[in-house]
Amino acid sequence: MKLFPILALVLLASCSKTNVPKESTGSNVNGLELSIIEVDGCEYLYSSSPYRAVLAHKGNCKYCTSRAQE
């Protein structure tokens, strides 16, 4: 039972780092700055604030475009 608080602290501390590379677009939507992230071989538009988030597949994803041409 003494390991539970230590395990909880490790899990909470590990959530602060991002493991997905972000690229800024320089665009804002409703005050949220949009970034491009790559997840599982596709590009997504991403933005977040403490009370809302946006995640949408990019319509001109370079990976999907190259797969469609094959």
Image: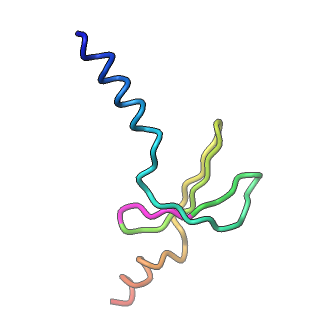
Query: Which of these two is toward me, 40 or 69?
Result: 40
User: x%, y% of residue 30?
Assistant: 76, 53
Q: Is residue 38 left or right of residue 4?
A: right
Magenta stretch encompasses residue 47: no
Q: Is residue 57 left or right of residue 47?
A: left
Q: Quadrant of residue 58?
A: bottom right
Vertical relation: 68 (above or below) 50: below
Task: Give the residue furthest to the right.
Answer: 31
Q: Residue at x 64, y 68 (%)?
A: 25
Q: Residue furthest bottom?
A: 69
Query: Is residue 61 toward the left or the right of residue 19 in the image?
Result: right
> Colour scheme of this structure image?
rainbow
Residue 40 in which image quadrant? bottom left
- Residue range corresponding to the magenta coloring: 36-40
> Camera-side residue: 60 or 26?
26
Q: Position of residue 62 (x, y in %)?
A: 47, 79
What residue do we see at 54% from left, 77% from top? 60
Quadrant where the C terminus lies?
bottom left
Quarter of the figure that contains the N terminus: top left
The number of numbered badges drawn on the structure is 0
Which residue does the image show at 38% across and 24% down from the upper left? 9
Q: Main secondary structure of the magenta part?
A: strand
Q: Position of residue 15 (x, y in %)?
A: 43, 38
User: Residue 39 at what x, y percent from top left?
Assistant: 41, 61
